[in-house]
Amino acid sequence: MKAIFDRLGIRRLLNLGVTEQLGLESSVRVQLSNLIAFLGIFSNIQYSIFFVIAGAPHYQFMNLIHLIVISLLVLVLYLNTKERYSLSRIILVFTISVPLFFVSTISFGTSGGFYYYFLMFAIVPFVLFSYEEKWWILFIFLMNTAFYIWFEFFGSPGVFAKGTLLYHKKVQDLFRINSVVSCLSFVALFMFYFLRNINRIQKEMIRTNDHKDRIFSILAHDLKGPIGTMSKFLGYLTSSLPERDELVFALNELKKSANQTYLVLENLLDWVRNETKKTQCNLEKLNLSLILKNALDILNIQATEKGIFFETQISEKYSIYCDERMTSTVLRNILSNAIKYSHPNGKVLIEAEPVSHFMEIRFEDHGVGMTHDLLEKIIEGKRFTSGFGTVGEKGTGLGLLVCIELLKEQGGTFQVTSKPKEGTKIIIQLPLAD
């Protein structure tokens, strides 16, 4: 169904005026406004044709009313594209009642059952307006309810010329049946669409709360350790005059904790940006060897402490077309994981070569590896609980997820193969620079 809607352009029409700045609830109201406008245009065209065929009284005047209403509904769609949503909704709720009032007053009377539509239009403002606009909701509801009561109890049947289709009672009954079925169908469509999007809003709220809990968890646990270490060594340095060796050791620990804090914060911010669709990708020609060297420099202390050796086989002439910040984040995350899950005094192999229109970069370690279930979660982009490194290092579980999303943003790919106790191999591809 989604593919059919996309092919027919229906989804694009329903999303007229919907922007990234709108919240989910506001977007739903704009979509409903567009849906009602399109249904109104279709209905007015349809009834204009029916009135001519059936010989309805004053059908020329009614067709003029239909033309005006269609023009106003097109204006509603235009105002939505210009992001004038409030004015668009106000015009819409008044406009849709106009043809019903005239057709029930000067043409059909109560014979065709067109006044039933007033009951449907009485509930439309409840799905179009927010609670803050409750006075508009109440006014439109009372107006349409009053119209329905008037025609139901004080209206009179239409007078139809002999020889026209509408002169026959069965044809009048067909119009009445059509009115009832149309009203119920439209109400069902509105409510189904609204319920569907309420469900989306609930899921978004659950996802937002889940993200909030995740962020608090990272701030409480993964930043507490390195910041506590920094505080400890700063207190030590400010309360005494350490020897040179002790000073170098303390400064190295401070640098390691600062790097760890930086990586955690960067991963957290990149994850939040990606989840809120606020990631900005600035592609440019960059030297791969230089970006990799900068990433290794940041992780130098962490690698040296564990005795991890990096064997790089990358030509300095290789250039890639990517976003520098995103790519640096990806490389640091992959290398940090390789250090974390490699055994002390282990080796990490880094290779790169052009493959078709991409630069393929391979990272291989012989550390603890990953289970099949964990690999599946990573490949599917699902969150997972990060295990401890070989010397007790703690991770956030965001690193590889951030890598996958940032690579997608740049038109790259991510592959991972791993076996427990044998190691992990990660292959990423980024577009080559022309």
Image (cartoon, rainbow, N blue to C red):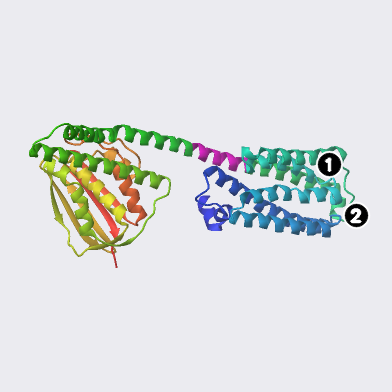
Chain-order first, disc 1 or disc 2:
1
Query: Badge 2, how many Cα within 10 Å: few under 14, some, many 20+?
Result: few
Please provide percent x and percent y for residue 135.
Answer: 69, 38
Secondary structure of the residue carrying numbered label 1: helix
Whether residue 53 is visible here, answered yes or no, is no
Identity, as a three-letter code, of the amino acid under mark 1:
Phe
Going 59% across and 45% down the picture, which residue do you hit? 29
Is residue 366 or residue 26 the one in the foreground? 26
Going 75% across and 45% down the picture, which residue do you hit? 179
Going 55% across and 55% down the picture, which residue do you hit? 12
Is residue 202 or residue 225 the one in the foreground? 225
Identity, as a three-letter code, of the amino acid under mark 2:
Ala
Residue 89 painted magenta: no
Task: Please say if 51 is above or below 373.
Answer: below
Q: Which residues are magenta?
A: 190-203
Residue 427 vs residue 308: left or right?
right
| Corner quadrant of residue 143 | top right
**Could you tell me what secondary structure mostly forms the magenta stretch?**
helix
Please provide percent x and percent y for residue 131.
Answer: 62, 37
Residue marked by disc 2: 161
Asked if labels 2 and 1 touch by Cβ distance under 8 angstroms, the answer is no
Query: Badge 1, how many Cα within 10 Å: few under 14, some, many 20+?
Result: many
Q: CA gap, disc 1 to disc 2?
A: 22 Å
Residue 16 vs residue 360: left or right?
right
The circle drawn on residue 151 is: 1
Whether residue 383 is visible here, answered yes or no, is yes
Please provide percent x and percent y for residue 349.
Answer: 15, 51
